[in-house]
Image (spheres, rainbow, N blue to C red):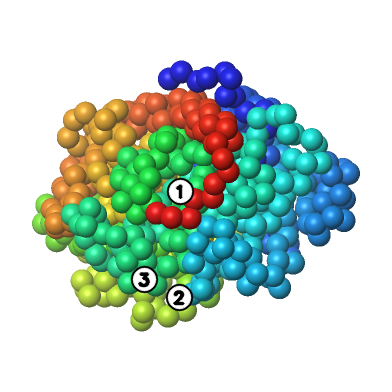
Amino acid sequence: MQIDVNHTPDYIFETSWEVCNKVGGIYTVLSTRANSLKKLYGDHVFYVGPDVWKEQDSPWFIEDTELFIDWRDFAFRNQNLEIRAGRWDVPGKPIVFLVKFDFLFPMQNDIYAQMWEDFRVDSIDAYGDYHESTMFAIASGMVMESFYHYHHLQASKVIAHFNEWQLGAGALYIKKNVPKIATIFTTHATSIGRSIAGNHLPLYDNLRYYNGDQMAHQLNMVSKHSIEKKAAQNVDCLTTVSGITAQECMQFFHRHPDVITVNGFEKDFIPKGKAFDAARKKTRKTLFNVTEKTLGYSIQRDALFVGLSGRYEYKNKGIDVFIDAMNNLRNTPQMSRDVVAFIMVPGWIKGARKDIQEKISENILSETDCPFVTHELVEPQHDNVMNQIRHLEFCNSENSRVKIIFVPSYLNGDDGIFNLSYYDLLIGFDVSVFPSYYEPWGYTPHESVAFSIPTITTSLAGFGVWAKKEGDTIDGLDDGIQVIHRNDENYHEVADEITSLIYDFSLKSAKQVKMFRQSAAALSDLADWEHFIVHYQEAYSKALEHSFIRLSKPYKLMVND
């Protein structure tokens, strides 16, 4: 891939709701990519995040009160911008600015009116997180504008990169107020595509028939879709993370992405050799302990630990398929090995279950009232996972070879039961399953193979599509991954194939499993940022090229479709 040196940026600003704010997969994208960008552009890469921390500070932010202090004082005096500067506590330690945005709420209606006037962004029916996200987006644009003018960057090649619909207003702000800055907008998933899928409508069979604006009205998504669409249409470079989502962009935004910026992963923090073996042994001890205290009895020492994780999107993440597959496995007469299937998706909880905490603390093995869940749910009667477990009459009895344990908590190291981070827990699993229906990329299977965990995913995940092309060459998990073909019609076939794969895996020898794990790690080596950062370089180059072309023409704001 040829990168035009004449279109190489001097400065890059990138902003997301998840900068120093770990709430989803975009945090992984940005935080693992930061080191690669630092190597290319040094301290001319600046991240802008929301300063939403009150009682406690962000655990991922290292404040430096002297960093850019003169500019920050200037920004506060002239634009009322409260900016904290420091470093993001991730590999590469990039410079980060956290900005408060509460001061914009009194001006919210005026801002929305101006967005309508300039770009026809429809905010009239906005609700929920739209307001908070949009005010932060405007504030992030103001930060970039202030830095640009204070440091006289008019002769420099500057990139402003905005992630997801939450930052769409920032992209439009920069286009209007600092048109010399080249803009990039990355949609990691279209809001309409995700909503269609989540509402049990056939996204893929009917994609070419859907009208994005019409579906936004039908699904009460008008404001989010509007800001996302206008940002996509107005930036110098539109990117997304997979060919699957590129089709949605074309259908819903009427613009094909300029670059597919597939997601890489930074593996430097994963232990190696003896350190890996020691970490895995320690985690498996924890998995056995929590399993037995939750179930109330001992399990086989060669039990197979199977995991599913991610956001709690019951259909989109394939949680429904996973439970049905485990039910099939439970009813497989030949099954002779214990399988413990963990569903690790954060739900609405009160906290860790006190009875399980006591059993772990006192090392007591006794019966439990609800041997399915590690944390106390606020409304268990309305929980999809619990309702499906009950519907299938799972009982997690001692004579059943397959058990399901629901972990509805964020795994950040202090959940009260495991007290391990997700990565520290992942290292102890035998196999992972992510039968996604809607998954623009899919960091969970990507992370699994990086940790040498053989994984099952689908052809509706961006990572699955990539893996099918690059490494999933044979049926089964022998090559470390199995990408199951999934469409709008074959739900039960997918569940059956997962059942078969896990059953076959349970029969493999330790020597065979070791080879599977090595194959998984080898595949992940092809999907790290060392290989994928070039796509971002291409996006920067195209954004600058397109901005030069734009600036050579009469100024125009794109408000029409």
Q: Count of labels shown? A: 3
Gap in angstroms between the C-alphas marked 3 and 2? 33 Å
Q: Is residue 555 left or right of residue 391?
A: right
The numbered mark, 2 or 1, whose residue comes first in the sequence reads 1
Q: Residues within 10 Å of mark 2 (few under 14, many from 20)?
A: many
Q: Is residue 42 left or right of residue 309?
A: right
Q: Nearer the viewer, residue 561 or 431?
A: 561
The x, y position of residue 10, in whole percent, is 67, 28
The C terminus lies in which quarter of the figure?
Answer: bottom left
* Rendered position, 182 above or below 135: above
Looking at the picture, which amino acid does disc 3 mark?
His
Residue annotated with mark 2: 377
The x, y position of residue 49, in whole percent, is 66, 51
Give the image quarter of residue 90: top right
Looking at the picture, which amino acid does disc 2 mark?
Leu
What mark, if any, has residue 233 been given in the picture? 1
Gap in angstroms between the C-alphas marked 1 and 3? 20 Å
The numbered mark, 3 or 2, whose residue comes first in the sequence reads 3
Instruction: Name the residue at 65% across, 38% down.
Output: 180
The x, y position of residue 129, in whole percent, is 54, 68
Does the residue at mark 1 contact the one at mark 3 (Cβ under 8 Å)? no
Q: Is residue 19 left or right of residue 505?
A: right
The numbered mark, 1 or 3, whose residue comes first in the sequence reads 3
Does the residue at mark 3 contact the one at mark 2 (Cβ under 8 Å)? no
The x, y position of residue 210, in whole percent, is 26, 59
